[in-house]
Image: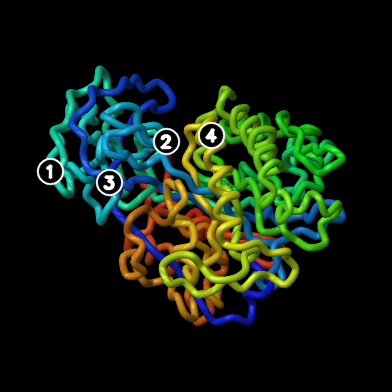
């Protein structure tokens, strides 16, 4: 969240939806092979949702001297979010990206397959409950494609060995590895700002004992998904540059820290949503200025190098890890709206109002940057993709990107105009699951408690919730645990 947000009256969130899920390539011992292709159906819009930014248990520490905490949130550390992607849509029987399957084939991490869609609960070509696969293998056998929206074709034959039946699907949740769940957890955000991944003595590996204790606390209290920031700026040394400011690769202890994070996630049975960038990358005081994302993002050569030399090797390393399944999603960027100026391209949203401390770019320039990063992630990883949007105020801003689920944040200024208790469909955002990726652990003004928020979102068609935490916003772990205990299966992948 940005500093400019604090005085504003605006925003809550949008969109919840029903999810048609085609299971393929589940993790663990599941044995799945894709079914034969069915006739081409209507293009599916399926996908899943993700989470938001995070703060360290006991208060996030702000790394180095690079002022980079997201502004706002009552003066606490900044919000984070990022990256949504495709993987949930099957397009006219054509190939869909990672996370989506086409022609009854691979369903990746929870996209709809073969004309499957995610619209108001029914999949195009037939309802998809408990992980049934449109036109491919289903939990219990072959799924026959019913009529698909504007008239789809017949489903294909069942594959040899399907996903196990989901015992507790959450109908409007985010699908991953054949499980449809209410994505529940917290924002870690960081142990050391911008240094957790690649920061040497300040990285995850060097601070393992502290990180381990914090992750254990999260896990023991029912947090199943942890949103963790990677490079909110490049001051930590995790990315290398040449003398012209062009990215040349991963530096420092980046890959070692990534593997340590995945190993710890596996040890404590949690999943990571890794937030690659933040609006903090656009701060005007970044030094050297050549490492400001406002420069990197709009220069085609430098942007390509960022994707090819940094994003793809990082995602590839995660995918090749023995604990690859612990990356449930990539959050491309936290609250990019605070680094965008001018009119919004879509949906009649209000014009952007960039943070005063950022060097903003246009909506088109930001969209191009995020699109290229998502393409790089899709090439290397089957994890879901989302973008950590700042508020419902600009809810259409990133809908043209290849995301599996939408993610929105809410604080008091948003609640004033976009209240928490409106459903996704009331916000006109019913085409993909919606995860509330950041919100105060202390609730909202007016006596709205943590549990009020969670119960409302759980009942009103949202797909998940990840509370923020930092030195200002302290988590009550008993409250986090109480909700998880009330829904033990539906909140655990």
For marks 3 and 1 on the same chain, the one whose residue lies earlier in the sequence? 3
Which residue sits at x=27%, y=46%? 117
Left or right: residue 227 compared with residue 397: right
User: How many numbered circles does the render carry?
Assistant: 4
For marks 2 and 4 on the same chain, the one whose residue lies earlier in the sequence? 2
Quadrant position of residue 380: top right
CB of mark 2 within 8 Å of CB of mark 3?
A: no
Tell me the residue that label 4 is attached to: 326
Q: Nearer the viewer, mark 3 or mark 4?
A: 3
- In the rendered image, residue 113, in percent from the top left (x then y), is placed at 29, 36
- In the rendered image, residue 171, in percent from the top left (x then y), is placed at 29, 50
CA gap, disc 4 and disc 1: 36 Å
Tell me the residue that label 3 is attached to: 117
CA gap, disc 1 and disc 2: 24 Å
CA gap, disc 3 and disc 4: 26 Å
Tell me the residue that label 2 is attached to: 97
Tell me the residue that label 1 is attached to: 147
CA gap, disc 2 and disc 3: 14 Å
Which residue sits at x=61%, y=63%? 362
Which residue sits at x=23%, y=26%? 37
For marks 2 and 3 on the same chain, the one whose residue lies earlier in the sequence? 2
């Amino acid at each position: 969240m940005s500093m400019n947000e604090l005085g504003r009256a605006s925003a809550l969130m949008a969109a919840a939806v029903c999810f048609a899920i085609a299971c393929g390539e589940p993790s663990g011992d599941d044995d799945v092979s894709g079914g034969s292709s069915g006739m081409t159906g209507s293009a599916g819009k399926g996908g899943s949702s993700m989470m938001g930014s995070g703060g360290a248990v006991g208060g996030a520490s702000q790394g180095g001297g690079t002022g980079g905490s997201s502004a706002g949130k009552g003066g606490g550390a900044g919000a984070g979010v990022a990256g949504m992607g495709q993987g949930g849509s099957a397009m006219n029987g054509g190939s869909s990206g990672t996370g989506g399957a086409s022609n009854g084939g691979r369903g990746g991490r929870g996209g709809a397959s073969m004309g499957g869609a995610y619209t108001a609960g029914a999949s195009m070509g037939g309802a998809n409950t408990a992980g049934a696969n449109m036109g491919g293998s289903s939990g219990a056998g072959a799924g026959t494609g019913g009529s698909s929206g504007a008239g789809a074709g017949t489903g294909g034959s069942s594959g040899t060995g399907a996903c196990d039946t989901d015992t507790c699907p959450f109908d409007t949740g985010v699908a991953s590895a054949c499980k449809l769940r209410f994505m529940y957890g917290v924002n870690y955000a960081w142990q050391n700002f911008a240094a957790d991944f690649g920061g040497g003595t300040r990285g995850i590996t060097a601070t393992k004992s502290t990180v381990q204790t914090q992750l254990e606390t999260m896990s023991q209290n029912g947090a199943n998904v942890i949103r963790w920031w990677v490079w909110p700026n490049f001051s930590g040394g995790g990315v290398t540059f040449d003398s012209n400011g062009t990215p040349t690769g991963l530096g420092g202890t980046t890959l070692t820290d990534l593997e340590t994070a995945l190993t710890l996630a596996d040890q404590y049975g949690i999943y990571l949503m890794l937030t690659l960038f933040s609006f903090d990358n656009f701060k005007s005081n970044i030094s050297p200025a050549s490492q400001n994302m406002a420069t990197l993002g709009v220069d085609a050569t430098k942007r390509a190098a960022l994707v090819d030399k940094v994003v793809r090797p990082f995602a590839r390393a995660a995918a090749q890890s023995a604990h690859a399944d612990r990356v449930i999603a990539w959050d491309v960027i936290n609250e990019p709206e605070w680094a965008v100026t001018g009119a919004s391209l879509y949906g009649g949203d209000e014009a952007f109002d960039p943070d005063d401390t950022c060097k903003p770019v246009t909506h088109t320039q930001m969209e191009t940057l995020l699109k290229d990063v998502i393409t790089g992630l899709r090439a290397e990883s089957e994890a879901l993709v989302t973008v950590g949007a700042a508020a419902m105020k600009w809810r259409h801003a990133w809908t043209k990107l290849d995301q599996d689920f939408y993610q929105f944040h809410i604080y008091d200024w948003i609640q004033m105009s976009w209240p928490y208790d409106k459903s996704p469909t009331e916000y006109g955002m019913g085409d993909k699951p919606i995860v509330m990726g950041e919100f105060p652990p202390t609730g909202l003004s007016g006596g709205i408690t943590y549990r009020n928020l969670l119960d409302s979102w759980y009942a009103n068609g949202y797909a998940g919730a990840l509370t923020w935490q930092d030195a200002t916003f302290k988590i009550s772990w008993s409250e986090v645990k109480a909700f998880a205990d009330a829904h033990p299966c539906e909140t655990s992948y």
